[in-house]
Amino acid sequence: MCISSVLHHHHVPPCPRPLAFVTHCLYCPDATVNPLTSEVVAPCANVVYTPDHGVNYDDPCSTGGCIVSPQCSTGTCRLQDLGGRWVCCACRRGGNVYRTCTNRKVGSPDTFCYHDVCQTCKPDGSPGKESTLSS
Ligand SMILES: [Zn+2]
Ligand SMILES: [Zn+2]
Ligand SMILES: [Zn+2]
Ligand SMILES: [Zn+2]
Ligand SMILES: [Zn+2]
């Protein structure tokens, strides 16, 4: 039998997003598997739901199931907050659209800056303007 339970995703301050509840399923060998990808496509006929009283929706942390939101830990939230385009606080150049700064590192043009978007990085308010190509 497969076990379905409710976990919750935390966003890490100062990310203002609220808790998100997610259903997580532990599949047993009877679950239906896609033979091509060997991914589970459906649980078996005997799904056990961990009792609802196991989750206190007012204080979910008290009953466990805490997980840091993968979106938050990877910087996806911050990228969204900055409107998808940001100015790197490490090299001060904009035009970044990924979670990591892809401007060339100052002084070593073969290397990217690789600064991960953080709270100090600013939104890039100049759409269309490509990153400064000064040499
Ligand atoms: Zn099962
Ligand atoms: Zn929690
Ligand atoms: Zn977040
Ligand atoms: Zn940078
Ligand atoms: Zn930064």
Image (tube, helix red, strand yellow):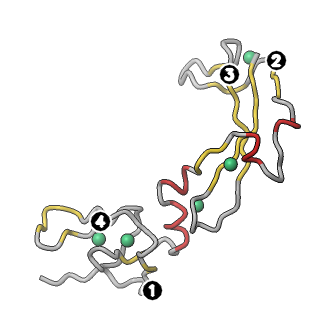
Q: Amino acid at mark 2?
A: Ala
| Mark 1 sits near ligand 5, with its Cβ under 8 Å away | no
Residue pointed to by mark 2? 45
Q: On screen, 119 above or below 132?
A: above
Mark 3 and mark 1 residues within 8 Å of each other at the beta carbon: no
The residue depicted at 69 percent of the width and 35 percent of the height is 24
Residue pointed to by mark 3? 27
Find the distance from the CA under tag 4 to the CA under tag 3: 40 Å
Task: In this rendered view, identify the residue nearer to me: 65 or 81.
Answer: 65
Q: Residue 101 falls in which quadrant of the image? A: bottom left
Q: On screen, 127 above or below 109?
A: below
Q: Residue 23 falls in which quadrant of the image? A: top right
Find the distance from the CA under tag 1 to the CA under tag 4: 18 Å
Q: Amino acid at mark 3?
A: Tyr
Residue pointed to by mark 4? 102
For marks 1 and 4, the one nearer the N-term is 4
* Tally of marks: 4
The residue depicted at 58 percent of the width and 64 percent of the height is 13
In this view, the residue farthest toward the right is: 53
The residue depicted at 65 percent of the width and 44 percent of the height is 66
Position in image of residue 40 (x %, y %): 64, 25
Position in image of residue 135 (x %, y %): 11, 82
Residue pointed to by mark 1? 125
Q: Secondary structure at mark 3?
A: loop
| Mark 2 sits near ligand 1, with its Cβ under 8 Å away | yes
Task: In this rendered view, identify the residue nearer to me: 100 or 133.
Answer: 100
Position in image of residue 6 (x %, y %): 75, 39
